[in-house]
Amino acid sequence: MAPVGNALVSNLSVGVDMMKLTVLQMLEAKRGLDALAQKDLPVTTAWKIARMLGPLVPEAQAFDTAQKKLFEKYGEEEKGQRKIKLEHMTIFQAEMEKLIGQEVELKDGQKLTLAELGDVKVQAADLARVEMFIEETKV
């Protein structure tokens, strides 16, 4: 145990709840949090969103790298754009489905409340993307 202030904090993540998402769910959540991060929010809410985005960034980068490798493996360059060869389309789609279906484990940390978003105008699609990060408050 390491001393932090007046408390002792274990360096082990004992009892830390983990949130399991598919890569697709993680990418959608990142997209929704990115949209919220662009809004004019109170500083504490903006900070919370930035912290929630933190663990998603390296996971999204790992996906981008894996996706790029699949494009390089099954595609060809055409007019500055990479296109999947027709004869490889089925295997490419199968591998992409497998990739976006992989599970990602994230520490189940902070959640937002709708009250924290205040009167900010938010698209319903963005809220749907971050539903797992929203905690409903009891009235």
Image: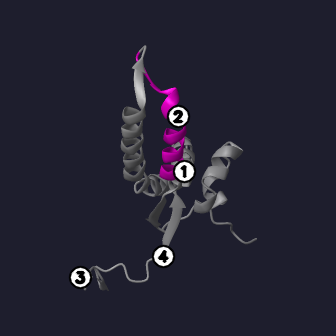
**Secondary structure found at label 2:** helix
Q: Which label is found at residue 50? A: none
Q: Nearer the viewer, mark 3 or mark 4?
A: 4
The amino acid on which the numbered mark 3 sits, given as a three-letter code, is: Ala
Q: Nearer the viewer, mark 2 or mark 3?
A: 2
Q: Nearer the viewer, residue 121 or 64?
A: 64
Q: Nearer the viewer, residue 109 or 48?
A: 109
Callout 4 touching callout 1 (CB < 8 Å): no
Q: Which label is found at residue 24? A: 1
Spatial separation of the CA atoms under disc 3 and disc 4 = 21 Å
Callout 3 crowding tier (Cα within 10 Å): few <14, some 14–19, many ≥20 = few
Location of the C terminus (image quadrant): bottom right
Q: Is residue 42 visible?
A: no
Percent from the top left, x then y, of residue 105?
45, 65
Q: Which residues are magenta?
A: 80-100
Farthest front residue in view: 87
The verdict on residue 35 being magenta is no
The amino acid on which the numbered mark 4 sits, given as a three-letter code, is: Asp
Q: Which residue is mark 4?
A: 17
Mark with earlier residue (3, 4):
3
Spatial separation of the CA atoms under disc 4 and disc 1 = 21 Å
Q: Which residue is mark 2?
A: 89
Farthest top residue in view: 79
